[in-house]
Image (cartoon, grey):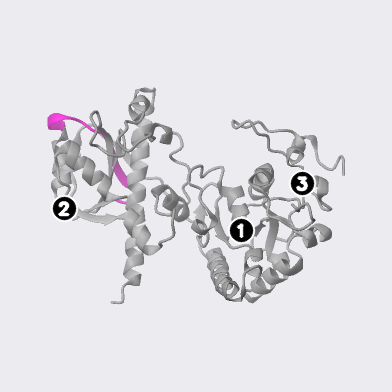
Amino acid sequence: MEGFFTSKETESISRPDGKTYSCFSCGLYKGAQTPKMEPWGDFGKKILIIGEAPGRAEDQAGIPFQGNEGRYLKAFLKKQGVDLKRDCLSIYAAKCRPACDKGRDRKPTNYEIESCRKLALKVIREREPKLIIILGLSGVYSLVRHRFKKNFGKFPKWRGWTIPDQDIKAWVCPTFSIQEILERNKKEKYETEVIWEQDIERALNKLEIPFPVFKKPKIKYIEDLSVLNKIKDGTYTAFDYETTGLKPHAKGHKIICCAIAVSADKVYSFMMPKGKKLKPFLKYLENDKLPKIAQNMKYEDTWSEVLLDTIVRGWDWDTMQATHVLDNRSGITSLKFQAYILFGIIDYDSEINPFLLAPHANSINKIEKLIKQPGGERKLLKYCAWDSILEYRLAVIQKKLFENLLPF
């Protein structure tokens, strides 16, 4: 089908890793009966459904979700009052059918998904869906991987969330691909099918909920820490350190800065002073009438004891431990992951993170090089402030969830 693609679609796009991502470099279109399958559906309810890739039935028909998978999807959506054609728009993470040498359907490779990503993002940008239901890991990889750059993990960590993605301005809801359900044995199929149905129902319920816009916090950059003396007893606070490493015991380690969120919308951020200027902060740490929140409180507790010779009092909530109690899946307890799946905030740390990495637990990182760069200190203080405000907001949500779990 020479001439089917425009020159812009087939041109190579340079990447830092030296690879190119384009329809031409991918090459799937060469073996497809319906290359670059077009979006299908009337989109009446602004629901976008992203499958992994066309199969044989779809490739022959030229329309997404035909064959067994399509019938399965249509039947369940109909029970929920949703018509696949009238209410939805259907696309794939890879727009051309990937097939094995023997002609059987297969999942697209990461490279094939990368090559097609710009086309999926173009549909989202132009059509502005309210809800995006992702069927399988390929769709998550397409929409999220280029923004969630570390610890992307496997599919189980992504399944089942209803994510208010602030970049896309839509609910992003990943669940199993239909193929995964159909290929399982009888017992596993039933269990997976029940979970899949619950995921889809939870996603569709979001259509009735206004999309939440993340409210940016008010960050107060302070040098005089006496303002901390004005925090009233009983005020919940979340505090976060940025340090020269993971553990404070080796010679040369320092606490570089700190941020204290005093509400869901207000946070103080400051470079760590020395001598008498530090006293208001030490008083804050020692005040057991100020309930304190942290993400992995052992970290702030240890650094306070070793470098500030101060025992933190008033510990109230550890957001990392609470996350694990609420959902024991692996790979989900990091603040960055929780910030995305709960608040839709993604990749706020990529500029800072390289300076925080160190080869060993007691090694000194490059954070002091960052603060010597023009604007580096303010960037670090802002990053620290976002960490503490997200910890505060996360704790608020977790406390409500725990209240609902209690039998009294």
Vertical side of 120 occupied by 49: above or below: below
Q: Which residue is mark 2?
A: 233
Q: Is residue 222 above or below residue 100?
A: above
- Magenta stretch contains residue 270: yes
Which numbered disc flags the more N-terminal residue, 2 or 3? 3
Disc 2 to disc 3, C-alpha distance: 64 Å
How far apart are the two marked residues, 3 and 1, measured between alpha carbons? 20 Å
Mark 1 → mark 2, Cα distance in angstroms: 48 Å
Image coords of residue 333 (percent x, y): 39, 53
- Residue 136: give its label: 1
Position in image of residue 73 (x %, y %): 67, 69
Residue at which label 3 appears? 28
Classify the position of the N terminus by image quarter. top right
Q: Contact, CB < 8 Å: mark 1 with mark 2? A: no
Q: Is residue 142 left or right of residue 247?
A: right
Label 1: few (<14), some (14–19) or many (≥20) C-alpha neighbours in 10 Å? many
